Amino acid sequence: MTYKHFFIKAPIVSLKGQPAILFDGKKATLLEALEYKKVKVFSECRNGFCGACKTEVISGEVTYIKEPLAELKANECLPCCCIPQTDLNLALSMENVELVVRSKSINKKTLTQSKDAIELAYNIETATAQQS
Ligand code: FES
């Protein structure tokens, strides 16, 4: 048995090529995950019957939690009753989507400069102490 069986990458859901959601399984369906991020998807039955939530899939694959009754084309999915199986690119708008922005990383150069400043201050203090 390898670690490959334990660590499976969570699918990334993109909207028109823009990554928007890391589908980590906290939401039961793709529709819930999209709604949580405030992506506008029209829905009615939320069970795969009506086809109201039909969404165009640009790339990627989904798995259905239960087999949908609504008729679908090969490049469509019903977010109300599926989850992403692979990274997914949907033809949905990014309008109103809340994205998490990473905080600025610490600049390595700044750290080096700070260290240099501390060393310089130490050297000045040491030289001053030796003179007096
Ligand atoms: S909301 Fe009816 S099929 Fe998705």
Image (cartoon, grey):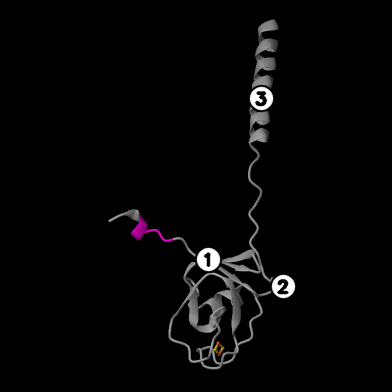
Residue 132 in view in this figure: no
Quadrant showing the C terminus: top right
Query: Can you identify the residue that label 1 sits on?
Result: 87
Quadrant showing the N terminus: bottom left
Q: What is the distance, in whole Å, between disc 1 and disc 2 at their CAs?
A: 20 Å
Q: What is the distance, in whole Å, between disc 3 and disc 2 at their CAs?
A: 46 Å
The main secondary structure of the magenta stretch is loop
Q: Residue at x 31, y 54 (%)?
A: 2
Query: Can you identify the residue that label 3 sits on?
Result: 116
- Categorize mark 1 by other alpha carbons within 10 Å: few (<14), some (14-19), many (20+): many
> In the image, is 34 to the left or to the right of 47?
right
SS class, disc 1 = loop
Q: x%, y% of residue 76?
A: 57, 80
Give whichever of discs 1 and 3 has the lower sequence position. Answer: 1
Ligand 1 is within 8 Å of the C-beta of the residue at disc 3? no
Give whichever of discs 1 and 2 has the lower sequence position. Answer: 1
**Badge nearest the viewer, 1 or 2:** 1
The picture quadrant for ligand 1 comes to bottom right
Q: What is the distance, in whole Å, between disc 1 and disc 3 at their CAs?
A: 45 Å
**Badge nearest the viewer, 1 or 3:** 1
Which stretch did the figure color magenta? 4-8
Q: x%, y% of residue 111?
A: 64, 33
Residue nearer the viewer, 118 or 72? 72
Mark seen at residue 95: 2
The amino acid on which the numbered mark 1 sits, given as a three-letter code, is Asp
The amino acid on which the numbered mark 2 sits, given as a three-letter code, is Glu
SS class, disc 3 = helix
**Badge nearest the viewer, 3 or 2:** 2
Give whichever of discs 3 and 2 has the lower sequence position. Answer: 2
Residue 55 in view in this figure: yes
